[in-house]
Every structure is written in structure tokens, then in C-alpha cells.
Amino acid sequence: MATVAFIGLGIMGAPMAANLVAAGHEVIGVNRSRPAVDRLVERGGRGGDSLAVAVAAADVVVTMLPDAPDVSGVALGEAGLYAAARPGTLHLDCSTIAPEVSRRLAEAGAARGLDVLDAPVSGGESGAVDGTLSIMVGGPADAVARARPLLEAMGKTVVHVGPAGAGQTVKAANQLIVAGTIQLVAEALVFLTAHGVDREAACRVLAGGLAGSAILDRKAAGMLAHDFTPGFRVDLHHKDLGIVTAAAREAGVPVPLGAHVAQLMAAVRARGHGDLDHTALLLLVEELAGHSPGHSDS
Amino acid sequence: MATVAFIGLGIMGAPMAANLVAAGHEVIGVNRSRPAVDRLVERGGRGGDSLAVAVAAADVVVTMLPDAPDVSGVALGEAGLYAAARPGTLHLDCSTIAPEVSRRLAEAGAARGLDVLDAPVSGGESGAVDGTLSIMVGGPADAVARARPLLEAMGKTVVHVGPAGAGQTVKAANQLIVAGTIQLVAEALVFLTAHGVDREAACRVLAGGLAGSAILDRKAAGMLAHDFTPGFRVDLHHKDLGIVTAAAREAGVPVPLGAHVAQLMAAVRARGHGDLDHTALLLLVEELAGHSPGHSDS
Amino acid sequence: MATVAFIGLGIMGAPMAANLVAAGHEVIGVNRSRPAVDRLVERGGRGGDSLAVAVAAADVVVTMLPDAPDVSGVALGEAGLYAAARPGTLHLDCSTIAPEVSRRLAEAGAARGLDVLDAPVSGGESGAVDGTLSIMVGGPADAVARARPLLEAMGKTVVHVGPAGAGQTVKAANQLIVAGTIQLVAEALVFLTAHGVDREAACRVLAGGLAGSAILDRKAAGMLAHDFTPGFRVDLHHKDLGIVTAAAREAGVPVPLGAHVAQLMAAVRARGHGDLDHTALLLLVEELAGHSPGHSDS
Amino acid sequence: MATVAFIGLGIMGAPMAANLVAAGHEVIGVNRSRPAVDRLVERGGRGGDSLAVAVAAADVVVTMLPDAPDVSGVALGEAGLYAAARPGTLHLDCSTIAPEVSRRLAEAGAARGLDVLDAPVSGGESGAVDGTLSIMVGGPADAVARARPLLEAMGKTVVHVGPAGAGQTVKAANQLIVAGTIQLVAEALVFLTAHGVDREAACRVLAGGLAGSAILDRKAAGMLAHDFTPGFRVDLHHKDLGIVTAAAREAGVPVPLGAHVAQLMAAVRARGHGDLDHTALLLLVEELAGHSPGHSDS
């Protein structure tokens, strides 16, 4: 069993850390605000006095942070992770950031004798709680082998997809598909509403055929109920679509539907819905279809 | 057990008819070309001498035809289904056609004392063979109750979604989602190729998270192998996207991603790929990304 | 000089008829509501007692009507144009309708010994008033030669573009470009607003370079002032974009940006702005950008 | 009359510098390769021995370079423009780069006592030769007043649109509109071809109505002739669309058609047409419509 410093106990990080505790690891929680640490302690974890102390005590450091500047700040700062960690420490970054940032972190870590993996996750809060996340891992094979027991405590589908940054690349592709699928389901729902069809019945039959998807299975009920409690926030998905369109541009490949839905997500955010679940794309489609803002589907 | 005239023994119709035989029904096959009828006879069905004779002998008539003119021709012609059928006969139209055509057929059938249901299906050839289709049914509840044993012999998810035409409306929504999802997966694959990521590994992890879908489960392997044997042909999906965009226009609802992928499907067809599986959207995305036409991914 | 029955004295038709009067023709006005006829009489025209009487007295019949059913109704009805007109009469249809409807009218007219031309116009109300319309003419060359003096009384750029229906095809292309250009200008304006740039100065410099267009010249001021008095209504442009996307589909050519802006125009209409000028696409872009509905740019 | 160091004598820069010579200014040309300098000397300019020497001798320095790193390299390098220029020198950057880079340059220049203006241009090679460019100027009013005689020697429409960076913001909007308009015209042309319409006649009538634009006036003939000699290269317009979509993202405004055409331009580039004129968007639309690559429209 490993000693794990877990940095970032938010909607996703908290249950992931709890699953590491449940798997028998010693987990030291580090978080900007204290209550999240206290809740981890209640679940059997420990509280870290400071990032540097927690990291120095750890075999493995997991980071689960909102954006690239957060991860870079934690990793590269003067009193940061890479300065404080003992050589041989494994850094498992589960944040979703640009592939090139992950590659830079891997180089910086290697220069200090650390193993660094990018290991972003998909599956949402429920997947984090249930330990059924998909985890897409980039980095050297031996580090992946070393990380696997921890990863399998947090996820069900753990796949090594390539060298440093490859995990982020696959996560970017994941975010393109997820946003697009939400939008397609939203268009279908508004289309069905306009034609007076029973949408719950329709969702059941759609889910059973070639239109079936994790979005229909896990998100359609919330969409039908107009419940946009995150889950995964529009602001973060907007950030991720910026990563994927930029990475596509760099690689010289068009992603027409991806770029299209990125514009729609930007519109959802511009309309003030950045804190809602990403399924709030439905609100935008309803507005485009002329439904009044106060419209209720329930 | 019912006596069923089954009209249209193509890629989908043949295995659906065979499943009705397997469920114990007496099935009279009618098809433009004879070999398909012979194959049904080998499976335990009967051959129909003519459409009129087959229909006159039947309790239930199933039609599984490519497009609205085919169905209207069979149903409304002078020696056609509605002229030949005994009052009380149930017409189960499993074709994918415009909702308004289904509504007109339902009226014409009712005028002759027939029960008419629109019951388009989703799930592809494999779903038809395995009897695991999703079937979206529109029409009166009592007729649906009467049809249910037959429908459940052909499909796993059978849902009554509303009055006449509602099945087609849901099928239109289904086709919007399916085309869009194929396109999203195609963009993701080309994006991953451009970044040098192991695409098979990536597909496994994508399928396990929120990006997961029936398309990833059933179609990604063929896409990776560049095997575009239909399955469901581009020509037919192009036709269906014409139905969904027209029906959205009539209802006054925008379907931005749906209309976008309809243009891309039109381009696949214009480039001469109408006879390939609809996953040939991948070919278009590869061409947009500058891959040479002879490019092989295997 | 010709005797002209002019059917349809709306925003466009009234000044076009007045220009025919000014050119010395005898013009008999026919309109659903009387005041428009009275205004033409004040300008030197005559009022028609009935369509049939007016047509029977005319050498040339001009129709300027909202949509295909209006034109077909007037032309093909029992007491309609083609029944009442003397053989040899020229029917000049300036309405914007589907090319195939124009082709059918040309055939029906020819069967009765009439010359039929499709001659839709572009240039808006100001072009109609000033007699500076662009007119795109489809039909036989001799009929175009015969019509030219009348067409040149109404427009500045009169071009024979091909056989029956070709005028409508070019008009469809025109409407695709016009809608798209309005949308591009709208996006540019919202982009400039968000960056705090002086938009009037920007429009001046944009109009002078490669971004220059008739839309920037004639419509930007109204857009900046949020004055959406038609001009050309959203409802009609929405209808026209239905024609162009359907005609593209029939011809097997994708029109990706055209189909995209058709969805946006549909959304403007769905949001209740069908009676505003088509530049109300700006309202939609502002809403997508999160500007409040009551937002004023003046 | 001013002494002007002109840095960057490419397709656009060479005729712009020549127009400054013609207006009576002393122009010292600086360019990576010598022949362009020699051609300027033939026109009455002088050759610069080095950037530093040329700049030190100048009242005004004009830069006309491909991309932000070029401008930053020239301006901020150790032996660069800002190090070599005398206090009070005016730096007129006519390159098209991101607004934020222009703002940073303005700050860096101000810190050394220089006046810096961003003054990107529109109008293409012909506008540069004829001195009819549109020039969109950002920076302090007094510097703009000082620069005006030089700007008016190069352009016809010179507009001060706001503070530092505002010129670039307007240029970004310009590039969005230009790319979109080319694409709309390309779609119209392919649509007209598919319907067998005379495209030259059609272009004449389209140019005269509300669809009229500088693109139709100046570029349609080349498009009809399939002559894609630049003019303005796809590679550069692709770069510019990256600037506009990024700037829109930062400002939180969606630009749906802009983002769409950015994907299409990326596809033209990915297909190996980066060195062609940006009207090569037509090639892509033709390919989407199934025209063979060797297809000739002439």
C-alpha cells in the first residue's frame, strides 16, 4: 500500500481520494479550503499541513485540479511539488489540461528523478463515486505499471494510450465527443417536443438502438427534468473545447462538428450558464427554438 | 399465432421475417427479386404468388421498404395492400419515411377499416439478425397492443411513443443522433491519428466513459479497419437526414448540428460513396484532413 | 408601350409598378387590398376590377407575390391568369419561388400559347424605388428580348441567365450569399463590440477593403442603430433558404455555410422575429453572446 | 517628407514601399533576401545595410511581416528596432497579428519613447499596388495624425478605430468576413454549376444586387477561371482565422460562421493548398460536391 498525497478535493477529487482510502492506501488530503480535507479525514484519510510536507511524505502524488495554471503552479512553484518530492516519487496528474503542458511537466519531473503520468478521467461525479471512471493514461510503461493499482481503485477502464501527453490527447477527443453528443441529444429532445412526442418514451427507445450513448443513459433524465446541477460545469467543458480545437489546429486536422459545438458551448457560457452542468446546452437549443427562458418541461 | 405477409426482404427485412418464423408465425414473403423469398422458404416461411394474394391471406402485413414512394406505391396502388387487405388487417410499416406520409397512410388505412402502425427500427443488420432492434411505434394503443408480440419477436426495446407518425418522428431524431455520433467519432479518430495516439486503445477507454455510445461499441472496429461494407448505406442515411431537417423546418425548430452533419453526409454521397456504410463519414473527415484517398489505417 | 397587368402591389411590387408607369406603360394594378391599388392610381396607373378582366386586357402580366402557392394560385386557378390571358401574352413572374415551380409554370403557360419568364429581383425596397434592382431572368431568349424594356424600367442590372427556372436558381444563390453576408457582418459587429472598438469607424474601413459588400454599404447603419424595419422580412428569407437548401440537396451539392445560416435564420424566426428585417440575425448573435434582449447599441 | 525604414518587402510590402517613394519620402528598404531591396532601389528607394542602421536613420519605421513572431523578433530583439530607434521614432506596424501582441509592442515601444501604431491593411496585392488599401489604425490620436500622410500614400480608406490593438481587432473582423464571403461565393458557384446555369452571367447579376461584394467584384473572375495564384495565401488566412477565433473566445463571443469557415480553411490547407490564393476554398467546395480534382470549369 502506498502513501498518497492527494491535491484537489473537489467534486471529482474528493470521491477519488475516498476510493484510494477504501482500497487501503494512506491518503493525505491537500485542498485550498479546509472542509473538504475534514470530510476526507472522516472517511479515513489524513489532513496535510502543507503541500510541501504532504508531498515529502508521499510515494505518490495525485493532482486533480481545474486548469493548466493550477497544475503548473502546484508542480513547478518554488515550494511546489517537484521541489518538495523525493526522487522516485510518482506524480499522477488526473486534471484535464493541454497535452503540451503535460509533456512539459513530464520533462520537468524527469529532470528531478520523478515519474510523471497524465491520467485524465471521464465518467463524471457518479463515475468518481462508484470508482467506475475511464482513465486514459500517458507516460512510460513502467510508471503506468506502478500506478495501475491506484488507478484501478479509482476507475474501471484504465488504458495506457501512449507517451506523455497522450492521455490528454485522448481526453480532448473524449470532450469533443461528449459535448457533441449532448448537443445532438438536446436537438433531438427539442425536435421531439415540437412534434408533441412523449420524450421519456422516446429516450427509452433511442437509448436501446444505434443512437444509444452514455449521455442518453446517464444524462437524459436530468435534461428532461431541466435539472442542470453539475456534474461537470459548462465553464470547464468550454475550457476543454478550447484545448481540443487548438490541438486540432496545431495538428492540422479539421474538426467541423467539434468546432461547431465549441461555439454553442461558448454561447451557453456567454448567456450566464457557466456554472450549470454541461447538459445546459439544452437551454440554448430551447432558446434557439423560441421557447421562453422560463419554459419548464416538467 | 398470426399469418403475416412480409413485404421487403432486404438486408433488414430478411432477418426480421426469419425471426417472425422462428417465433411460430406463418410468414408469407413478398419481394421484388425471387432469391430472397427462396431463402425465407428455407427458413420455414412461404413464398407469396403476388402481393394481393399474400395480403388477402394475412392477419398482419409488415412492410420494410427503402423510401416513402415504395411504401405508398405498395399501400395505395390499385392492386395494392389497402385494396387487397381484409378489414381488420393490421399494417405494420417498419420502413423509415417522413412522419407526414405515415399519417396519410394511417388515414387511408383507417378509411378501409385497417389498423396502421408506423414502427421504424434502429439497431442495424446485427440488431435485425439477433432480434435486438429498438422499435419506435406510432399509432393507436389498441393496435400497438395487438402488434406487440410480433414486434417483440423482432426487437428488444419496443416503445409506443405516440399517435400515427410519432414512430417516424422518433426515428428521425434517432437518425440525427446516429449520423452526428458517427461524425464525432470520425473527427476524434482523425484527431488521434494526427497526434500519433494508439487508436484502438483510445477507443477502448473512450467507450468506457461519458463518450461511450453504441457507435463506439458496434462501429469503431469497422471504422478502424476501414471496412465500410453496409450495414446501413450512406444513400439511405442521406435520405433520412432530408426527412429530419425538413421535419425540423416544418416544426420551426433549429437543429444546428443535425443540419451540419446532413451537409457532410451529402458530401460523402456526392463523392461517390453512397453505397458504403454510413461510417464512411470517416473517409470524408480523412480527406478534409489531407489524408490521401488511398490512405490505409490498418 | 405595353399594357401591363401588375399583380401584387406590396413593399416591392408597388414601386416596381410605379416605375413601369413612369416609363410610359399603361399599368393596371391588382392587389388583395384596395389602398395599394389606389396609390398606384394616384401615380398614374389604373385599378383592375378583377384579375381576369385586367389580365384579358394586358399584353404583359407581372406577378410579384410572396410564395409559390400564391403564384400557382393566381396563374393556374380556374379564373386565373393562364385561363384569362390572350394567347401571346407575356407572363413575367418577379416572385422568388422554387426553380421547379417556375419550370412547371413555364410549361403550363406554353401549353396555352403564353410566354413565361421567371425574373426574380434583388436589391431590396430601395432598389425597387430607385429602379436599380438586379433582375435574374430565366426563359427563352426571344421572350427575354421582348421583356427587356419593361425589366430595364424596373432594374439596372438585367441578365438573362438561362432557360426557365434559371432565374430562380440564381436568386436562390443570391439569397444564400445575402443571408450569409448579413450573418458575417453581425458576427463582426458583436466581436467588435466585445473588444470595445468604435463600430461606426470600423464599418467604414471594413466597407473600403476586401470585406466590402452591399450589405455593409446599405444595411450596416440600420444594424448599428438596431433598426430592423423591413426591408425584407425574416419570414421570407427563411422561406428562400428552404428553397436553396432543398435545391442544393436535389442537385447533390453541399452548401455548408448556406445550411448553417439557414438554421440561424430559422432560430431568428422561432424567437418571434419573423416580421423584422433579415438583418435581425444581429439580434440572434447578440443573444448568443449573452447581451440582454433589451440591450441597446445606440 | 520623412525618412522611412521599411522592413518586409513581400507581395504587399514592396508596392506599399514604392508608393511611399512615389509620395516623396526617403525610403530605406530592409528585407531578408536582397532582390526585393534591389527592386526598391530601382524605384527610387535606398537599400539598408542592416536593420539597426536603417532604423537609426529613420523618423518612421514600417513593418510588414507575415506573423507575430516575425514582428516581435524584429521589434524586441537585442539589435532590434526598439533598441536601435531614436526616441520619438514612429513605428507603424502594418502586419496582421493578434491584438494582444500589438498591445504588448505598444507598451514596449512607449517605454523607450517611441510611438507605436498597429495599422493592418485590407485590399490585397492590387490595393497595395494602386494605393487603395483600407487601413485600420489603432493607437494614440496624435501618433495617428503624425502617421496619416504616410498612411494616405499607401491607402484610400484610412480610419482610426481605437487604442493600441484596435486596428488588429478590426482586421480580425475583416478576415472573418472575407473568408466567409469567399466561401459563400464558392458555394453559390458550385450550386449554379450543378444546376447548369451560366455562371459568368450569374456573377454579373449577383454583383449588382444585395449579394454584391468586393469578393464578387475582384475575385469571381479568378475563381471562374480556376486561377488561384496569390494574392493572399491560404496559409496566412488560416493564421488570421486562428487569431479571430481565439480573440472571440477570449472576449466570450461566439462567431458560429467564422468558426465554421475557419475549419474549411484548415481543410484547404490540410489538403496541400496552403500556397494558393484564399479563393481556393472553391476547390474544397468542388471536392465536397464530388467534382474530380482535375475538374476544369473553364
Image: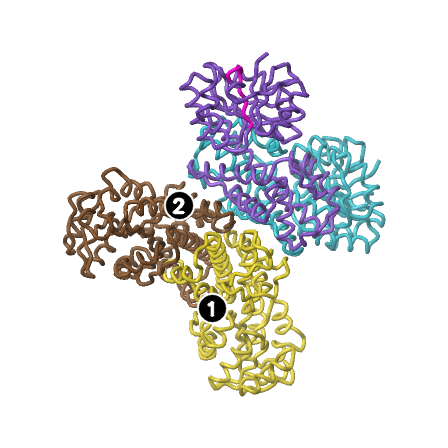
Chain colours: A cyan, B purple, C brown, D yellow
Front: mark 1 or 2: 2
Seen from the viewer's position, the closer of residues B13 and C268 is B13
Total number of numbered discs in the rendering: 2
Q: Position of residue B101 (x, y in %)?
A: 45, 30
Local crowd size for mark 2, using a 10 Å CA cut-off: few (<14), some (14–19), many (≥20): some
- Is B133 placed above or below C219 here? above
SS at mark 1? strand
Seen from the viewer's position, the closer of residues A36 and A261 is A261
Res. A132 mark: none
Segment colored magenta: B56-64
Q: Position of residue C1 (x, y in %)?
A: 19, 60
SS at mark 2? helix
Q: Amino acid at mark 2?
A: Glu
Res. D136 mark: 1
Q: Position of residue B229 (x, y in %)?
A: 67, 39
Seen from the viewer's position, the closer of residues D1 and C86 is C86
Q: List the single residue furthest toward the front.
A: B49
Local crowd size for mark 1, using a 10 Å CA cut-off: few (<14), some (14–19), many (≥20): many
Q: Which residue is mark 2?
A: C100
Instruction: Check residue B59 for magenta coloring.
Output: yes
How far, Cα to Cα, is label 1 from label 2? 46 Å
Output the chain of dot 1.
D
Q: Amino acid at mark 1?
A: Met
Q: From where the camera sits, is residue D263 visible?
A: no
Q: Position of residue B266 (x, y in %)?
A: 54, 45
Image quadrant of residue B49? top right
Q: From where the camera sits, is residue A163 visible?
A: yes
